[in-house]
Image: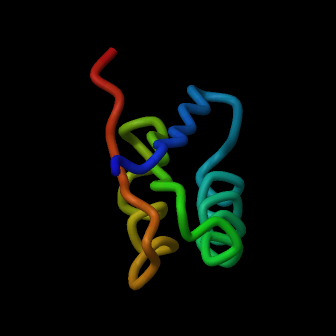
Amino acid sequence: MSRLLIAGNWKMHLDRQGASSLASGIAARAAEVPHVELLVCPPYVYLDGVATALDGSPVALGAQNM
């Protein structure tokens, strides 16, 4: 059986600190939905901070191309 995927793409609505904080919050609560695959796609300029915030969590990291 396939798993559901929830992806978040928040464009440029946050700054670097806000993007990392949001990612940390998602990572902290990811265990509450073990039957769902989670993916976040922050703006390219925030990938490094978000990757650090998600490190060790089950949340996948994607990138926007436009």
Q: Position of residue 17 (x, y in %)?
A: 66, 60
- Answer left or right for 21 relative to 42: right
- Answer left or right for 3 relative to 16: left
Task: State the residue in front, 58 or 36.
Answer: 36
State the quadrant of the C terminus.
Answer: top left
Task: State the residue in front, 58 or 41.
Answer: 58
Q: Quadrant of residue 43?
A: top left
At x 69%, y 40%, the residue is 14
- Answer left or right for 6 relative to 28: left
At x 43%, y 72%, the residue is 58
- Answer left or right for 4 relative to 23: left
Task: State the residue in front, 2 or 6.
Answer: 2
**Color scheme of the displayed model:** rainbow
At x 66%, y 63%, the residue is 26
At x 36%, y 61%, the residue is 48
Q: Position of residue 6 (x, y in %)?
A: 54, 41
Image height of 52 relative to 11, above or below: below
Q: How many marks?
A: 0
- Which residue is the extreme one toward the front? 1
Image height of 66 relative to 25, above or below: above
Image height of 56 relative to 18, above or below: below
Task: State the residue in front, 62 or 5.
Answer: 5
Q: Position of residue 36 (x, y in %)?
A: 53, 56
Image height of 48 relative to 8, above or below: below
Q: Position of residue 16 (x, y in %)?
A: 59, 53
- Which residue is the extreme one toward the top? 66
